[in-house]
Image (cartoon, rainbow, N blue to C red):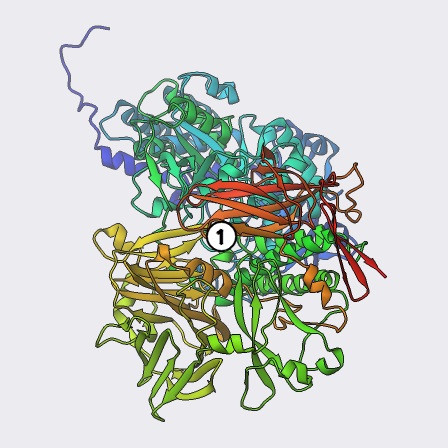
Amino acid sequence: MAYPQLNYNPGQKWIKNLTKDRLSTFHGGHYSDVNLSSILFLHRLDTPEYVKLKVWSAPGNTKPTFEEAMQHKFRSAKKGDSFGPSCEFTNHWWKVTVVIPGYWQQYDRVQFEFDPGCEAMIYSTEGTPLQGITGGYGGDRRVEYIIPLEEREKGVHEFVIESSCNGMFGVPWNGDTIAPPDMNRYFTLDSADLVVPNQDAWGLLWDFQTLRELIDTLPGNTPLQNKALKVANEIMNVFDKGDPTSVREARKLAEEVFGEGWEAKGAEIYNEGSKKSNVWGIGHCHIDTAWLWPYRVTQQKVARSWSTQVDLMERYPEHRFTCSSAQQYKWLEQLYPPLFARVKEKVLEGKFHPIGGSWVENDSNMPSGEALVRQFLFGQRFFETRFGKRCETAWLPDSFGLTGALPQLIRGAGMKYFFTQKLSCNVFPHSTFNWVGLDGTQVLCHMTPVDTYTAQATVGDVNKGLTNHKNLESSDTALLVFGNGDGGGGPLAKMLENLRRIRAVTNTHRELPPVSMGRSVDEFFEDVEKTSEEGKSLPNWNGELYLEFHRGTYTSHGSIKKGNRHSEILLRDVEQATTLASLYKYHKNDYVYPKQAIDDSWEKVLLNQCTWLSSFFGIGMVYDDAEKLYAEVKKDGEALLEEAFSILFPHSVPLTPSSRTKSLGGKIVAFNTTFLPRWDIIKIPLVKAGPALKAQVLQASENGKEGYAIMCCPDGGSPGALRSPTNALHAHLMPVSVYTNGSDHFVLRNASVQMTISKGRISSLLDVKLNRELIPEGTTGGLVIFQDRPNYWDAWDVEIHHLETAKPLEFSNISVVSQGPLRASVRAEVRYGQSTISVTVTFHFNFVLATVKENSRSLFNFDAIVDWHQRHEFLKCNLPLNIHNVNATYETQFGHIQRPTHKNTTWDIAKFEVCGHKYADLSEFGYGVAILSESKYGFACQGNVLRISLLRAATAPDAEQDQGEHRFSWAVMPHQGHFLESDVPQAAYLYNSPLRGMLSHINLRCIPAGTEELLSTFKAPFTVEGARNVFLETVKRGEYDSFEDPVNFDDKSTTTTVILRLYEAFGGHAQTLVKFSDHLPVVKAFTTNLLEDEEEELNVTRSDGLDGYGGHLALSFRGFEVKTVKLVLGTLPPLPHKRVLVQRSGCVFFFSSSPFCCLNL
């Protein structure tokens, strides 16, 4: 046709924004009765003739199994019924029978639509979970259950549904996600319908949605954006709800953008187009192990979400799904065995990908270094034993900051890749980079530029993977981690449909980056490693990944923080004591190392370290669960300790106020579980004490019921004994004193340091030896209260502006509790608002210092009992210091980190509240002061003011957070020399390590008369010599030993190993000797990774045992390096020397290179 000469038409010019606005009317909304929404279903039946419902409501907060539920009597139910309440996340079971009309056999799909307004799960009548249900009308809605073809052909289909009275994000009372739960919400069964979906109409809906996303995402001057808008507009023009052919015509129009015949290619669409994809899609379902719901609901969420993914894999061959947390897999294995079998099948097919290698997605700020090791050890061990392989990629997408210790631990756990995302809350300069840890170890890290681990697989998500990538000069690929999450759910069919369409577009257009499916996260990292020349072309980030957000979590719910710290230390001590008990054969031969009991306790502690609980800002029910687990760990751990001590110290008994030491005689001992020498002031009950014990008491309480004595532990890992008040001791005794003017001026002093409390505040801290005042003139230290009203995230956040609201609190009712000479203390009170704070400040005489290091200073200990009833206020302790440094030092896992004390940059300003473990320190050349903590994690140093955070009082999501009584301690430790010259790490280690006897509140044991000689045989099993900067942290039995029978070194069919974990604590190199007792017949030694795989054999140098040691190992360390050593025990060949015989009290003791033995005469 020739170009016409005349033209009287108006022309084809659109008003683009009006056309774009028009698109919103094609689905839903005001025109839903005439637009595409009106034809999405061909048939819908809900009458009892076709749908029969019966229900049984489980009582209270019970969570019966499928088999248990089926034993109960069900009552008739119907659509529109209400059920609840939500107070205990109640569960309701439905038996469903659907009758399918015969003429429906002509349709491709028949569905049952079940919308209870909450979460639910569909089971087969045999009890196999089939898929999850998410009720309501949010973006995570999934209410359809596709009836299998073979069941449709039968005409009748029966199945079971379990619904739970919680939404995807719990049941907030006012609709705000973080609000406390509504304890009396009832849900309504909005839909229980048998339906036939209009598959063509649904296909058009997804076509149109993708077109709209293209229009909204791409720039307005690109050909693809204009083409998509033109096609979408034409689709609206041709659509006619009364003409089914118009739908097919509209879908044909969509092929102008997606490509002709694209849909018939299915998953093969990903094999066309560009061979290189910039965006790699991976399905994911982030399930917070506890948050706005308790653990028992998480167990259900796992089953719902993962069964849904298995179902999607059957329909979408390209779908790959990754999920972390061995704990969640274990729950599935224990509670839903048929579903676990289906998941395992998909794992072996390479479609369901375990990832992370850890027990849970743990917080990485507050767990100890050893706890992080156990996260990986327990996680990797589970994945290997269940699926035959370990994980290669560490996975912590939602942790609130990441310790610089992690890269070394990740590599030690057999992984070299790391994925995280939470730092998108910061202005962070990298997407793909080498993350270099404290010790110099690196991992290949990717933080998706999509800025979420719950992407909805939209065009915008795919486009952001490239346009928001910060390292395109060195890496141009990104992970698209998509699927509903936090509360579970995972990918939906509409997401997979959308990605197919996006890929179809990029096969013929270049305005979007290509997206690929069908591969794993591990493969993504392997590709990055290869294309970046093994990371050489990538930028580096050194040290911690500090999150500029959620800083209040270091302090929220103090009881959880205390439970975590105390449980970690208890299990450390349990492992050491039970290891020694299992090896020292001269007392009892049938003792077996309680591996399973210890593992059970560790699993509870590791579970409680999940991000949203360890940081703790869950609802009250989560807190109840956690407290129960910590109580179990405490009870079981103390029982294990007592059993081990009964082996190590036969016939000994715990020293309690009711103990009759006069009749027992013997010695009072305590076990030093650290590998540091120590001197302690210990409290002894005197009511029933004999003269011998009373003679060792150097100070008695005012009522005479208790006394104080000195416990000397010259070696670590061994018992200590009371120090008798000899002339030599009195020569060193420089008494502590407390004096007062009788009202508001109190001074605690010994020969090294002095503290003055005047007018209710700490007005002076004096180094007596140096005559150096440490508190600047005109300032005071002590308790301070701040307003605490975050901009939104109540239990999570503390904002910088809270520092502008400081209100110093003054001690009152100060009284002298103890006047020396061994121990002096004053007790003070603070009454503020509805709260009462009682603080006892205690100080010891000069011979008992923070550590046994020469020139160590005494520390001032603060024991607080707080009855806390404030709301939205923050309690801290401030200490202004006459010390200047641009950095303060804080303990982190297996080392320390320095953070700024100034506000030079926004990054510096952001660190106004930081996480520390057992100490925070401000030092300059020649001097420093540290604050030690036994259960607190929040610290700060602004300028010259060192601060520890004590209590918060948020009201969401737990309305009663931290209300009630708290008991905690902290200490102030002056020290001569800079931090690196000091004994602060050792002092903090000892401060957190109680001497052990039996129970946590009973740290002494009485050795009966006639058996004291056993103490002389109990040498320290290990000593570390030559490097004060190397700490021996862990002593345990080897992970892969046999624990069915007692140790028998002569049995060649079994292997007995001991694991030592050591680390360098100051940040420098070290050469050290690890000596081992002659009780331990070490035949070989290896360095291993954290999973205890042998790496390098070490040279074992044996000795004659005359000094009590059987040999040693030489080890070298770089700064902050963690080393794991495996000692293999067995029968040693004799050394060519004469055995030494010693006879004492009816026993002959033979010392030789063979295991120590005792012969009773």
Which residue is nearer to you in this view: 420 or 11? 420
How many dots with numbers? 1
x then y, percent, for residue 866: 46, 77
Residue at far left of view: 5
Residue 742 vs 1003, above or below: the answer is below
**Residue drawn at the location 50% of the way across and 57% of the way down:** 614
x then y, percent, for residue 984: 41, 60
x then y, percent, for residue 370: 54, 50
Is residue 41 rendered to the left or right of residue 217?
right
Q: Look at the image and tell me whether residue 1055 can be seen.
A: yes
Element type where label 1 sits in the image: helix
Which residue is nearer to you in this view: 455 or 537? 537
Q: Quadrant of residue 429?
A: top left
**Residue drawn at the location 51% of the way across and 26% of the way down:** 519
At label 1, counting other C-alpha atoms closer than 10 Å, the crowd grade (few under 14, some 14-19, many 20 or more) is: many
Residue 758 vs 488, above or below: the answer is below
**Mark 1: which amino acid?**
Thr
x then y, percent, for residue 801: 27, 64
Residue at far front of view: 1138
Which residue is nearer to you in this view: 871 or 1107? 1107
**Residue drawn at the location 62% of the way across and 83% of the way down:** 695
Residue 146 vs 958, above or below: the answer is above
Is residue 119 rendered to the left or right of residue 554?
right
For the C terminus, the quadrant is: bottom right
Residue picked out by circle 1 = 611
Residue at far bottom of view: 742
